[in-house]
Image (tube, rainbow, N blue to C red):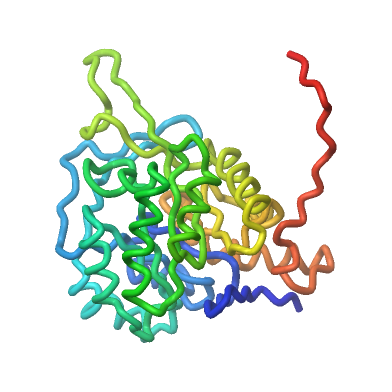
């Protein structure tokens, strides 16, 4: 039988399949559809100091091979999560990763301090890459020096593993990855959504109320796989969570082979609420068929071809 477990420092995952923040609620909403305890982890919807209402509609629009969203980080505050949502997840034996967001360094740190070293939480993921807010988010993720300072400011607030979710909307994702690690990140998540715009040509207005939105789904997967590969080459010892357009076990394997240690499944949950649980089973079956004893051994096994010295167009 294949060993699906993944050990990432102090973080122990039953499998490399996790839910992505923002696409799986707080996990409890899917309890009747997915065996939550079978997943590597549930990365909960982003947590802020206080409840947020998000942006006015329209907030979601379908696109070819994906969707645009500008929800605006609608969510419960940290106190309701700790007192209402987290106990339900803990009762079900769920490995929980708390995704955290703030407008300022102080707000990020305040949320993480409230989580502290709570034993019901396995790790903290900093969302420094949301493209659908005016403050916070990409303000940090697009500036390596600001990103490093933010991570360094938050790092002392918890002894839990610290994950930093990177933006693809940068010139050099490796520079952002290095900044996060230099600030104290234990794990990198990549990628978040790409900034996109969809227009209603009849009204000549954006189809999203916020004007732009975050593009997710299968359309972004090749970009995400490439960025995971680039960061793995540059930072071989840093654990990576791959995210972006995963729908099948082959997609999971793409990320693992490119260098990810585990993956997060996002947009596919909206089309198939049971996809994450199915992928755990499909990965085990694939490994059995191919004689893979430990899924962790697949990470970073990409065999690249030599590139020509000259490129002709």
| Quadrant of the frame with the N terminus | bottom right
The residue positioned 83% from the left and 39% from the top of the image is 305
The residue closer to the viewer here, 90 or 279, is 90
Q: Position of residue 135 (x, y in %)?
A: 22, 45
Expressed as whole percent of the image width and height from the top left, the position of residue 105 reads: 25, 58
Q: Position of residue 261 (x, y in %)?
A: 62, 63
Q: Is residue 8 above or below residue 105?
A: below
* Residue 250 seen: no
Q: In this rendering, would 69 be left or right of 308?
A: left
Q: Nearer the viewer, residue 202 or 227?
A: 227
Residue placed most toward the observer, 73 or 250 = 73
Question: Could one spot residue 95 in this view of the protein?
Answer: yes
What is the x, y in percent for residue 95?
Answer: 45, 77
141 horizontally vs 83: left or right: right
| Residue positioned 38% across, 34% down in the render | 195
Relative height, residue 60 to residue 300 (above, below): above
> Which residue is drawn at the image coordinates 42% and 77% (left, top)?
160
- Which quadrant holds residue 211? top left
The residue at the point 56 percent across, 44 percent down is: 224
Determine the image quadrant of residue 78.
bottom left
- Is residue 112 found left or right of 13 in the rendered image? left
């Amino acid at each position: 039988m294949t060993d699906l477990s993944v050990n990432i420092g102090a973080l122990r995952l039953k499998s490399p399949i996790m839910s992505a923040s923002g696409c799986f609620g707080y996990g409890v909403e899917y309890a009747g559809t997915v065996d939550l305890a079978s997943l590597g982890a549930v990365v909960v919807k982003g947590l802020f100091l206080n409840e947020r209402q998000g942006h006015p509609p329209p907030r979601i629009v379908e696109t070819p091979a994906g969707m645009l969203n500008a929800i605006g980080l609608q969510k419960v505050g940290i106190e309701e999560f700790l007192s209402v949502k987290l106990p339900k997840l803990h009762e079900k034996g769920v490995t929980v990763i708390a995704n955290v967001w703030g407008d300022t360094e102080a707000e990020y740190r305040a949320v993480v301090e409230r989580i502290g070293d709570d034993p019901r939480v396995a790790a903290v993921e900093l969302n420094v890459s949301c493209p659908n807010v005016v403050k916070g988010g990409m303000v940090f993720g697009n500036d390596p020096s600001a990103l490093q300072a933010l991570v360094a400011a938050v790092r002392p607030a918890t002894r839990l593993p610290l994950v930093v979710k990177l933006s693809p909307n940068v010139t050099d994702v490796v520079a952002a990855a290095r900044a996060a690690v230099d600030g104290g990140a234990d794990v990198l998540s990549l990628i978040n959504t790409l900034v996109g715009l969809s227009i209603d040509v009849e009204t000549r207005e954006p189809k999203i109320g916020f004007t732009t939105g975050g593009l997710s789904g299968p359309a972004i997967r090749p970009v995400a796989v490439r960025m995971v590969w680039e960061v793995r080459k540059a930072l071989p010892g840093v654990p990576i969570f791959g995210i972006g357009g995963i729908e099948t076990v082959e997609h999971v394997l793409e990320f693992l082979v490119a260098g990810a240690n585990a993956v997060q499944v996002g947009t596919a949950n909206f089309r198939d609420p049971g996809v994450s649980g199915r992928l755990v089973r499909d990965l085990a079956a694939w490994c059995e068929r191919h004689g893979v004893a430990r899924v962790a051994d697949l990470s970073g096994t990409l065999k690249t071809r030599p590139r020509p010295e000259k490129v002709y167009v």
